[in-house]
Amino acid sequence: MNFKPTSILLGSLALGLAAAMPAPSAHAADEAERVAAVINDDVISVHDLDQRLKLVLMSSNLPDTVETRSRVMPTVVRNLIDEHLELQEARKQKVEVESGEIANALGNIERQNNMPRGAMEKLLRQHGVDPDTLRQQIRASLAWNETVHQELTHDIHVGDDAVNTRMANLKANIGKPEYLAGEIYLAVDGPRNEEQVRSLAERLIEQLRNGAPFQSLAQQFSQNGGGGQLGWVSEGMLDDELMRALGRLQINSITPPIRANDGYHILLLMDKRKIGDGMSSGPTVDLLSIELNSLPSATFPERDAQLKRFQEAMMQYSGCDNLEQGSKNTPSTGYSRSDKVPENSLPPEVLNLISKLEIGQLSQPLDMPNSRRFFAVCGRHADEANGLPSYDDIKRRMENEQLENLARRYLRDLRRNAYVDVRI
């Protein structure tokens, strides 16, 4: 199983440096230490909250304005509360995150940005962010991922009947569309925060339409596991309204905020195809796709510099699993992985890029309007009886879905049983 916690993905680091901040007055210092929230025995200060706001705005390429802060504040507060609950539960279950693990994660971010050792800390400070703010976010993500695996893996049961039923449904849907989708999910706890969440969703839509990378916003704001990736979905796998919305999209476009029972969803359509396309149609490939996003306003020299940094950073990785991990740690990237894609269903330009690749080798870039797309072949197969996922592929996906659902329920129970007092 391959549960994906909310990982740390900084947006473009080519940002203007913040002006030097004056030394705080005594009144400002007292204000900073004021309590913003209490979670059981933990306290979030106003200073802690301000630091996380700065980190979120910096990494998501959102403007640091009063309006933006007011819109993202409820989500940032909720995420901070969740992180404290996750760390408290990790301590209870004797899960520890070593300082070396956090240092490695920070080092990966620096390498992916072609930065010398220690440069990330300097950059954060130049934007008024205490580096411990990022370290704490990384610590919570690592601790929760390990806790979920330790406490819930034994509860995962996907039997043959369930897998065969899913496979039968896929066969029954042959010829119907399926979609490669990304998602930003914003939970609504009740009527009291309905308008706040809706306002944030609209603000994120505005930023996405202005060129903000979907993956960066998903990493910081989406409250589902998976880091904003849904993978390939088809009829019966999502709410009917979400499936209908995907069906109306053009590739690389987004939905407006969609209100479901539990909150708001923003969907990105990355690709689409028909289930079973290419049945008995010749060789297939297991394909990893990595997309490097650029702002629409980026100049050609800026895009070329971004490409050079990306390619230099990815040189250290070989093999699809390592390339996938590398893309998670690389700013402004998203990835998807598809098994047994018929070669004759691929666009000629993609087939030309991958035809001579070694297994696990990254291709040259394919230019898109506001991005560049790279490919790696993870496996090649002779003529297949059908274009459907294998039994093992379906079982693995169902196990991941079950684990993510259990993890959400785990965290929801922690919230329900916690003492939480928000004072801002």
Image (spheres, rainbow, N blue to C red):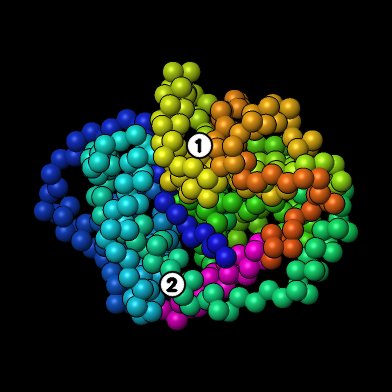
Magenta span contains residue 386: no
For marks 1 and 2, give the one nearer the viewer.
2
**Mark found first going from the N terminus, 1 or 2:** 2
User: In percent of the image, x 49 and y 60: which residue is there?
Assistant: 5
- The mark total stands at 2
User: In percent of the image, x 55 and y 37: which residue is there?
Assistant: 361
Where residue 378 appears, as percent x and y from the top left, is: 61, 45
Q: In front here: 391 or 204?
A: 391
Distance from disc 1 to disc 2, alpha carbons, whole Å, reads 32 Å
Where residue 18 appears, as percent x and y from the top left, is: 27, 35
Where residue 268 appears, as percent x and y from the top left, is: 64, 44
Give the magenta range. 396-421
Q: In front here: 259 or 61?
A: 61
Question: Which circle marks residue 247 in the picture?
Answer: none
Q: Which residue is mark 1?
A: 212
Q: Is residue 98 left or right of residue 5?
A: left
Q: Amino acid at mark 2?
A: Thr
Q: Which residue is mark 2?
A: 147
Q: Amino acid at mark 1?
A: Ala
